[in-house]
Image (cartoon, rainbow, N blue to C red):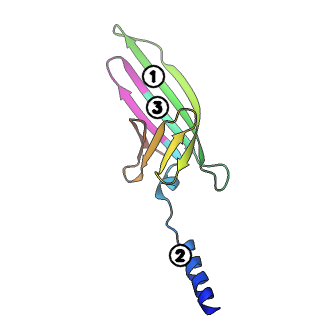
Amino acid sequence: MKPLLSILTILLVFGCNQPQDEVISFIPGVYARYGEDEFTKDYDTLAIAGPQETGSQVFQITKRQRFQKTIEGKQLPEQYKVTHLLATYSPESKILIVSNSGQVISFFPSRNELRFGVTSYRKIK
C-alpha cells in the first residue's frame, strides 16, 4: 500500500507542476504592421481573442486592413477591409492554423511579434 501511495504522490506532484505554455499565454492581444512601396501604403491590425471556453484551442481573429493605392502619381481614396477568422492552436508546434485557409501564424514572444505567413506583426497591446 505504501509503494502505491508514494507513486500516486509523485504523479500528483509532477502532474501539477507541468510547465506553462509561454506561447499560448502570449497569443491574445493586438498586433500591427505598416508597409509602403511606390504603389501602396497599407496598415494592418490583428486582434486575437483567447478561447471562449475553458480547454478550447480555438482563437477568434479580427483582421483590419487600411490601404491607399497610388496610380500614375495620384493617390486614390483609402480603402478598408475587415475579415473575421477562426484559428486552432497546435500545442505540439505552437502555431495557430487558420480554419478556412490553412494559413499558419507563428509566435515569437521574445521578440514581441508574430508572423502571419511571411508577414511580420508587432504586438502593441
Give whichever of discs 2 and 3 has the lower sequence position.
2
Please name the amino acid that badge 3 sits on.
Asp
Above or below: residue 8 compared with residue 109: below
Residue under the point 47% across and 51% down: 94
Highlighted range, magenta: 31-42
Do the residues under discs 1 and 2 have CB atoms within 8 angstroms? Answer: no
Q: Is residue 36 left or right of residue 100?
A: left
Of all residues shown, which one is farthest toward the bottom? 2
Q: Specify the label residue 14 is tagged with.
A: 2
Among the 4 quarters of the image, the one containing residue 70: top left
Image x and y of residue 58, in percent: 60, 46
Q: Secondary structure at mark 3?
A: strand
Residue 44 numbered mark, or none: 3
Provide residue 120's location: percent of width, then percent of height: 39, 38
Residue for point 48% across, 25% down: 66
Compare residues 95 and 115 and report the one nearer the observer.
95
Identity of the amino acid at label 2? Phe
From mark 1 to mark 2, how far is it between C-alphas? 51 Å
Q: Residue drawn at (51%, 54%), measured in percent from left and top?
A: 91
